[in-house]
Image (tube, coloured by chain):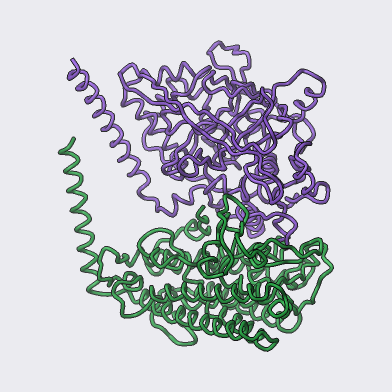
Chain colours: A green, B purple
Amino acid sequence: MTIQKKLMISFGLTVVMIISAASVFLSRDEINPLLITYANIATVNYMDALNDAKKLGTKLKDFTNNPTIETMGNAKAAWLNARESYGQTEAFRLSNGPIDVEEGWHTSYGAPEGRLNAWPLDENMIDYITNSKGRKTSGNIIDTPGMFNPGGENPLLIDVSIITSDVLAALNGNGGYANVATGYHVIEFLLWGQDQDYANFIKDNVTHGALLAGQRALTDYTINANADRRKQYLNAAVSLIIADLESITSAWADGDSTNYKAALLGKNSDVTKNINAKVALKQIFSGLGIFIKSELANERIAIAVLTPSEEDEHSCFSDNTHRDITQNFQGFKNLLFGTYNSFDYGVALIDAMKDKTKLMGLIASVNTKINQMNTLAQVSRHFDYQIRPNDSQARQIKKLKNELRAIGDQMIYVAKSNGIDLTVGNIMDVGEIKL
Amino acid sequence: MLGKLNYKYLAVLIILLLVISLMEMVFANDFSNLSTYELNQSFTQVQPNLSNDKLDKFILGKSFFRIPWVEAPSSTTARDGLGPLFSANTCINCHAKNGRGKVFEVNNIVDKSHVIHLSIPSNGTDEHQGIIAKLGFIPEPNYGVQISINGVPGVPFEAKSLVHYSTKNIHYTDGTIISLQQPIVKLEKLGYGDLLPNTIISARIAPALVGLGLLEQITDEQILANEDINDANHDGISGKANRVWSEQTNKIEIGRYAWKASAPTVKYQSANAAVNDMGLTNPIYEHQSCTLMQVECINSSKDGEKHELTAQRLNAISYYLTHLKLPKSIISQYQGQRLFSKIGCSQCHVPSYLLPNITIYPYSDFLLHDMGKDLADGRSEFDALGNEWRTPPLWRLGRVSLILKDNKNFLHDGRARNLEQAIIWHGGESGKSKTLFMNLPVSSRGKILQFLNEI
């Protein structure tokens, strides 16, 4: 048996050596142009997201140093702006990349998606809310000056005397993944507060109107007893966002032969880290399919419309969901067409597709519906009003969702025209959240 | 003498190792054409070709199955109502990747998917008979039907459970020794005083959610056709359907889900899990499971105001569970199947059912059988006695194992760490088949195990 085992091991080693030798050979010769386009868009898009997050950090600092209506407004504007670039980066998710991969060497970037963009959140854990009985709740991170129990399952007590990035990171997901303490939506909640326009969904007497979002009072940051803790929270949360985005931009940075971008392009100095081009493309096509169909169409639009629930709107405090949908779709189009901010980045995923009629038709139709949704959100009613069952727009949004699903299915053909086999199963389901 | 003995054992050991490594190679080959992603998603994919409207219902159910519930009141209006007493805050917590539960979360910490049911023996009074008619058993008066390991703030949890094992070795006729672990379950940190002295404690792990939509299409008649309550054919195997009270239809139905076949439908079982595992009232279970002495629980529940899990959402959850895609079986040889039948396993693990458009192969009769005193938990549920268990479906056991990775737990309380141990635990009516299995040569046993991993 020992001999057999030895033989098996040496055979296995030979195979590994042949494969790695082959990959070195391939990587020297040519880099797949589709991957170059994809990776270069990632580089600039994440850089933009990082810069916008830094601007948000500055505006939050201005606001917390001197809380006025004006500085608060500037901070809100900076948050909305930061979502524009980040929203487009979401198309890089679910593709086994550094933003959310759960295993492999590229987890060294921290896979911070869940920390950056977790939703829905149990905002009750962060700060007071007005509950369905009209009372202000207590027992949250903001109003607890010492040890805080996040609740949920097997929670660890955390010292929240001073709210720092480390404290927030320790709280995030502690006691279950409903316990969100970090990311864009936390800052959104601390700037806007609850948007209580859900009179249609539950009995609720508080309503601000179809064109207003959360109405957090400035006094929360001035005369309120916990004003300083809110300031601490905002600054700590944005620091963590910036740190996480710095990590991701380093994964996609040019001129680093040891990072993820180098591995994706097959030129990492550690050849064992290089990703086979076909595998890389399959992950990209599958990720885009899952993102457009399962995440955007299903999780972000369908559930909000079907429940119907304010909480299932992606940006429910600021009523910015129409922009999330727009920019998520834009991010998908960037990668499909190989463009970013109207600049052409080279060979695109769609180029090899012979008959583009159906896909282009769907995209045109989705564009129209998204434009309509955006216009209405500006002139008459936000997304949460548009999805009310008796609103004429609800039907349009259902159609939008169905068309996005159909676009997701089209990814099978886009992949095929690039020599990649994809099954319906590959684009069907958002991966299980790790428990 | 000693040297000789060691040599013998060594030979057996080497043969066994060879068999195991061969089996591993076979499995590796069969699963190698599936990506890790596909394997991980084994039980979570939607049936293909659902219309947009059906897909809507499916993903709505999926969202309520996966997204955490929070305590009420909150502004998370669609998902509040967790507790006051609960064990988990999502369904997926106990059915990771829709697979089965496990005994331990980490080290010796008991996982929340290992649930403790409580009951007491009936005293024969009208009151008890009335409860049994509706519930199937008498709940422990201070703690109710099931131990909740969590409570919302202000409501003490009921208890934490501990599982220890004593080992017992089983000898094959060929000298192979199998080490079984017999569980000893204890409750500690009891939040509401002592349990009644005669309390029956039954541990159960969450079953895998495999092919539920197809199982629901099997008719009651098809199940009843295999009944042989008094063993009229004298083959040593009886088989009795559980007849259970349904709050859904207000009549007695044939049970086919859960470890003692006490649930007639997927919807019924989902409603039961919602109220007992997460504290979510719903159209089938309208009241929180607070006992009379659990004052904090009573005071913080909102009984009668609304269903925390509304009819629409409960329907969506059961729609989700019944429209999951059944992954393919990967049977590569039929010798194992022939042996499986030959030693009598298929008498209870009935291979197939003819549905209107398809033949399915769940390997179960969905009937109750006496499984012997070693497996008996002493707990009755409707017509199921303390030594009786429902034949669990065996399909896709290999994928169940893949999902479980290092935490392979089989049988109702997860005591078996692999399929072979699960077989060896069989007793009662299944004792004869077990003995025949143990007398098979090692290669035949391997074929049966391989077959079980491939169905």
Residue A229 location, quadrant: bottom right
- Using the image as rendered, state which of residue B318 and residue B100 is in the foreground: B100
- Using the image as rendered, state which of residue A102 and residue A331 is in the foreground: A102
Q: Is residue A306 above or below residue B391?
A: below
Horizontally, residue B453 falls left or right of residue B109, namely left
| Rendering coords of residue B176 (x, y %) | 32, 22
Quadrant containing the N terminus of chain B is: top left
| Rendering coords of residue A121 (x, y %) | 63, 64
Horizontally, residue A326 falls left or right of residue A311, namely left
Q: Is residue B428 above or below residue A378?
A: above
Quadrant containing the C terminus of chain B is: top left
Task: Name the residue rendered at 72%, 27% in the picture.
Answer: B138
Q: Is residue B287 above or below residue A400?
A: above
- Using the image as rendered, state which of residue A375 and residue B196 is in the foreground: B196
| Rendering coords of residue A23 (x, y %) | 24, 65
Task: Name the residue rendered at 33%, 72% in the picture.
Answer: A259
- Using the image as rendered, state which of residue B117 and residue B160 is in the foreground: B160
| Rendering coords of residue A235 (x, y %) | 56, 77
Q: Pick out the residue farthest to the bottom.
A: A70
Task: Name the residue rendered at 16%, 43% in the picture.
Answer: A7
Horizontally, residue B76 falls left or right of residue B29, namely right
Q: Is residue B333 above or below residue A377?
A: above
